[in-house]
Amino acid sequence: MWCSQVNGRNSNHQPTPSGISAHLLLVLRKRAGVRVRFRYLSASRVTKIKARYLLRSRPPSEKLVDGSFKNLVVVMASMVALVLISILVVVFWGSLESMGRYGLEFLVTSNWNPVDDEYGAFTAIYGTLVTSLLALVIAVPLGVGTAIFITENIIPKKIRDVIGLMVELLAAIPSVVLGLWAIFILEPFIRPFLMFLYDDFGWIPFFSTEPLGPGIAPAILILVVMILPIITAISRDSLNQVPMKLRQAAYGVGTTRWGAILNVILPAAISGIVGGVMLALGRAMGETMAVTMIIGNSNVFSWSLLAPGNTISAMLANQFGEADVGQLSSLMYAAFVLMVLTLLVNIFAQWLVKRLSLKY
Amino acid sequence: MNNSSTTQSAVQIPDLGYKPWCVRNLRSRFLSVLAGLFAFLSVLPLIAVLVHILIKGFSSINVELFTQLPPPPGGVGGGIGNAILGSFIVTVIAALIAIPIGVGGGIYLAEYSTGRGFSQFIRFGTNVLAGVPSIIAGVFVYGTIVSTRILFGHTFSAIAGGTALSVLMLPTVVKTTDEGLKLVSNDLRRAALGVGASRFVTVSQITLPKAFTPIATGVVLSIARAAGETAPLIFTALFSPFWPNGIFDPIATLSVLIYNFSTQPYDVQNQLAWAASFILVVFILMLNLLARWLGRIASK
């Protein structure tokens, strides 16, 4: 009905049909061949408005600054990649000679003998793996337990916040200070206990040597202290991110506090916790100073945890400064092994976090 | 009929009161106590370390400690003035290298990146670089700067040490800048661009100032971490028993001093190591509290 009105010659003077927007009307008029005129705007006024709203064209100087700033930040971002790649290249390049000489045997032989220029890194690799894995075994229950304790409302929030703050500050203490503490306080303190292990369980190969000071066991304990804050902090974050609804639902169907934690909250937060644990593993494998100071730096292989041992990073810290060419290449090879190990752990951690993350 | 059935079921409703001796409640309480014990064990090392550093380090704090050089092996007295100054110099060099590059990289990731290809690679690289062991950074700088004598023929130097530390700081600064800028509301960016500001002006006048506190928090934390690092310095900055002699020469730092002196069989040196630990820990904890304070400002 209104179509016929618009199509009509004198549509300008007809009342606007209700329910039709002015815009639509305009379009329809155009279609009908009716010229729309701006009756109330004089020609001079139009040019004035045009001048006022004319788009300013950007001066070349501004374009130059903009473009070069973008290029600058791109270059700076590339520095990250550049550093990473050159670390890999430098370490790989330095270890080529040793790789050519020993090949993969380097990884499974345990004679490290600078005098005869014979090198095999099994002692250090064993030390690295056993210290970091055992430290993880101790630190995971402690860290996750602490995280649960300070995220669930077992005790008042103020005390929980203080515990959280203290664990975070523990992460800030430099590893060399922890090493100093381990040498003078921790090691003498735990020696009677290690002695007991040796006396009563000496038939187990892992406790088969007499503890005489620095060794793998105190190194494991100091590693626990170092990775505990990482595990706690990341577990705490992921536990905090579990939606309140899940908790309420669990309590609503009548479970106990730990029923809810073990069956609902932990599974929901598991991806973050596992990611944190893997990060901590990477950190434990690369941790240098505290371990160097307390592990004893022995190149003689022993299964025993009470004997002095070595890790790759401790070996680097000890020998790199005064190494000759052949030794340097072997140390670079060891560094390359360490680098590959930590890279694998880190990439695996990122993959795992993506894989395990629950959708709720 | 209806009425009687409800009363009947009401009679059958079991006792809903909390039964403290029920097995599952006992188990729950046992686990709570266990978690509390774990939390106590986690806090214990911090308390023990702090107490020992206080006892052993604080007693040897005096003026000479800040103004004198360490004594020769077997000597008496002396201080760690050169190491305090050296730590400061090396950390400043590291910050001067890492902060501009890191903030620039973070700006790229937050403001210009497309989230695909190159920027995804940079993000991944930042994460991987953050996981690189600190000693590897030392090996890297040894291989590129120290052994090649690229800095005008100098080998071990404060600059090499600072560069090694900056490698460790870089990923932290990039990440915190990226995350800080992402928190800035997109409306601000649109408004700035809408009134005709260029991309550069938008970033430098609007988004960067807005994200200043989170970025500053991250930067302070990364400085605190760098100040305590030892592993990358052992064979880049090395050590020197003398006052710093320019940035192209080996330099003493607090952390390397602790490492060297803790393994010496002399009481004087061990005591200086404890004093150095005290100064280092106080400095780092103060930086951490500063970062925490900045973070609180940011959240307000």
Image (cartoon, rainbow, N blue to C red):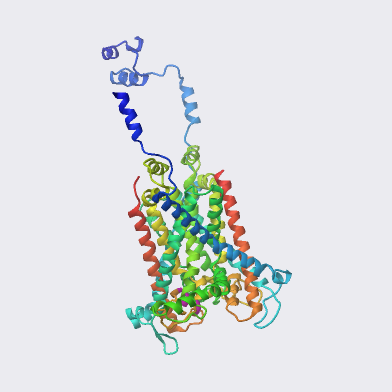
- Residue that appears at 64% across and 77% down: B269
> Which quarter of the image is occupied by the C terminus of chain A?
top left
Furthest residue toward bottom: A116
- Residue that appears at 57% across and 61% down: B224
- How far across and down, in percent of the image, does residue A129 sit? 40, 71
- How far across and down, in percent of the image, does residue A280 sit? 44, 63
Quadrant of the rendered structure where residue A172 is? bottom right
Q: Residue A233 in magenta?
A: no
Q: Main secondary structure of the magenta part?
A: helix
- Residue that appears at 50% across and 30% down: A52
- How far across and down, in percent of the image, does residue A254 sit? 38, 42
Q: Is residue A6 left or right of residue A343?
A: left
Quadrant of the rendered structure where residue B153 is? bottom right
- How far across and down, in percent of the image, does residue A251 sit? 40, 43
Whether B106 is drawn above or below A292: the answer is above
Mark count: 0
Identify which residue, A169 or B36, lies in the foreground: B36
Whether A82 is drawn above or below B104: the answer is below
Q: Is residue B191 visible?
A: yes
Whether A242 is drawn above or below B137: the answer is above
Q: Residue A317 in magenta?
A: yes
Q: Is residue B297 left or right of residue A81?
A: right
- Residue that appears at 47% across and 59% down: A230
> Which quarter of the image is occupied by the N terminus of chain A?
top left
Span of residues in magenta: A313-318
Furthest residue toward right: B63
Whether B231 is drawn above or below A162: the answer is below
Q: Is residue A309 visible?
A: no
Identify which residue, A162 or A123, lies in the foreground: A162
Identify which residue, A132 or B17, lies in the foreground: B17
